[in-house]
Amino acid sequence: MKNILKFTLFVTMLLSIQGCATHANFVKKYDAWVGQSISSLIGQIGYPDSTFTLPNKNKVYVYERSRVYSLPSPVISLGYGYGGLYGSYGLFGYEIDVIQETCKLFIETNKKGTITKWGSKGNHCVSQ
């Protein structure tokens, strides 16, 4: 029972920290860059992971972010006996959940280097 309380406290702390990072803030942040210079953006967030040129000669800067981590998740067995990922005796056990968060940001600029639009895809495009 003590382990379940510790796990619940850990998850609550993790969620409260992540509560500040939202997709809405991410959208506001990059909407504000439209009309600005790509050089200023690069100075602020760093060099892109890749670039490519569109048929209309506009350039796209691509930023990629990926994170993989694992969290223990409690498992309730229906009976006593050997079970769980690592094996345990008793009613409660733990398994490991692997979580992958990704975000790919696309910044499009015109020939003058002015940001004209942006887009993103992934399951964790958030900003604080």
Image (cartoon, grey):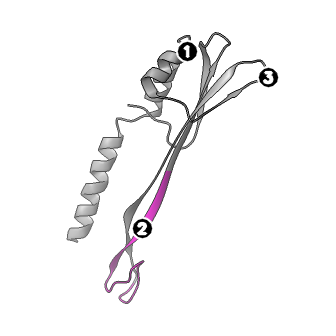
What residue is shown with label 1? 34
Instruction: Say what amino acid the circle numbered 3 marks.
Output: Pro
Is 27 one of the magenta-colored residues? no
> Which contiguous range is marked in magenta?
79-100
Residue 96 at x, y = what percent? 42, 67
Q: Dot 1: few (<14), some (14–19), or many (≥20) neighbours within 10 Å?
A: some
Label 3 residue SS: loop
Q: Is residue 121 left or right of residue 40?
A: right
Give the residue displayed 39% in from the left and 88% down from the top.
82
Instruction: Say what amino acid the circle numbered 2 marks.
Output: Ile
Label 2 residue SS: strand
Q: Earlier in the sequence, mark 2 or mark 1?
A: 1
Q: Is residue 117 left or right of residue 68?
A: right
> What distance separates the C-alpha of mark 3 from that of mark 1?
21 Å
Residue 39 at x, y = what percent? 52, 17
> What distance separates the C-alpha of mark 3 from that of mark 2?
46 Å
Q: Nearer the viewer, mark 2 or mark 1?
A: 1
> What distance separates the C-alpha of mark 2 from that of mark 1?
42 Å
What residue is shown with label 2? 96
Instruction: Say what amino acid the circle numbered 1 marks.
Output: Val
What residue is shown with label 3? 55
Give the residue displayed 48% in from the left and 16% down from the top.
40
From where the camera sits, is residue 69 visible?
yes
Image quadrant containing the N terminus: bottom left
Q: What label does residue 85 carry, if any? A: none
